[in-house]
Image (cartoon, rainbow, N blue to C red):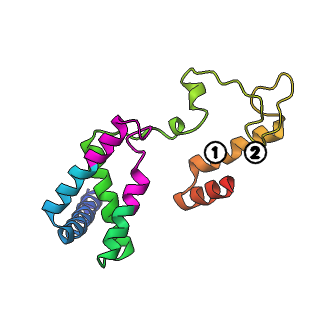
């Protein structure tokens, strides 16, 4: 019982310290300014989505986070602190517009198949070669195996490994 109590106390202390660090970062920005920026970001996100400029509420996440981080760095913030603040601002803005992130599968091209939309493929999903007669996604078993193994590494990988794999695939 004592070990269990100690673990809970340790977790509570860690959460309290993290909350203090977050509040200290926000304090550098000022609570009023933080709330004002969240309202403005939420307005921009909602306006862009409703105007059809973005395909989802998350469509401007990268540029907005980059802009906030860059402005904070120009004001003398350290990059890591500026990035954390930009993330917190964006998270609060997404909460304000009630945006929910899609699952990992919903973010993949194959999601349309799971959602019931049929895709007629003419090329291999892995290598891009024309599909032989009777093949619907891959030209051969090797392409299917490589494709599925890369997908499972992406699903199971740590963030840095996933970024490395994704960058390597895109180039």
Q: CA distance from mark 1 to mark 2?
A: 10 Å
Check the picture and name the quadrant holding the N terminus.
Answer: bottom left
Q: Secondary structure at mark 1?
A: helix
Instruction: Estimate the x, y position of residue 25 in percent, counting from the top left.
Output: 24, 69
Camera-nearest residue between 146 and 25: 25
In the current view of this chain or complex, which residue is farthest to the left?
A: 32
Residue 114 part of the magenta segment? no
Q: Position of residue 58 (x, y in %)?
A: 40, 45
Contact between marks 1 and 2 (CB within 8 A): the answer is no
How far across and down, in percent of the image, does residue 154 sit?
60, 49
Residue 152 horizontal side relative to residue 52, left or right: right
Magenta region includes residue 43: yes
Magenta segment boundaries in residue numbering: 42-66
From the viewer's perspective, tell me whether residue 124 is left or right of residue 98: right
| Farthest bottom residue in view | 76
Disc 2 target residue: 146
**Screen quadrant of the C terminus:** bottom right
Q: Quadrant of residue 142?
A: top right
Which is nearer the N-term, disc 1 or disc 2?
2
Type of secondary structure dominating the magenta stretch: helix
Q: Residue at x 37, y 62 (%)?
A: 67
Task: From the viewer's side, name the closer residue of 84 and 54.
Answer: 54
Question: Between residues 2 and 131, which one lies in front from this camera angle?
Answer: 131
For label 1, the crowd category at 10 Å Cα-Cα, with few meaning under 14, some 14 to 19 and many 20 or more, is few
- Compared to residue 89, the image places residue 104 above or below, namely above
Q: Which mark is residue 82?
A: none
Q: Quadrant of residue 132?
A: top right
| Residue 152, disc | 1
Residue 152 lies left or right of residue 1; in this view the side is right
């Amino acid at each position: 019982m004592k070990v269990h109590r100690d673990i809970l106390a340790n977790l509570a202390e860690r959460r309290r310290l993290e909350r203090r660090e977050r509040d200290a970062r926000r304090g550098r920005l000022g609570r009023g300014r933080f709330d004002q920026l969240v309202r403005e970001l939420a307005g921009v996100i909602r306006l862009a989505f409703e105007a059809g400029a973005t395909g989802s509420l998350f469509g401007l996440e990268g540029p907005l986070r980059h802009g906030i981080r860059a402005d904070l760095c120009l004001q003398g913030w350290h990059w890591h602190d500026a990035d954390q603040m930009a993330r917190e601002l964006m998270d609060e803005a997404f909460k304000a517009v009630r945006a929910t992130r899609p699952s990992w599968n919903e973010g993949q091209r194959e999601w349309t198949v799971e959602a019931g939309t049929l895709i007629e493929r003419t090329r291999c999903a892995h290598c891009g070669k024309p599909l032989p007669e009777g093949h619907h996604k891959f030209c051969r078993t090797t392409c299917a195996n490589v494709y599925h193994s890369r997908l499972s590494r992406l699903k199971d990988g740590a963030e840095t490994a996933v970024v490395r794999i994704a960058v390597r695939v895109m180039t």
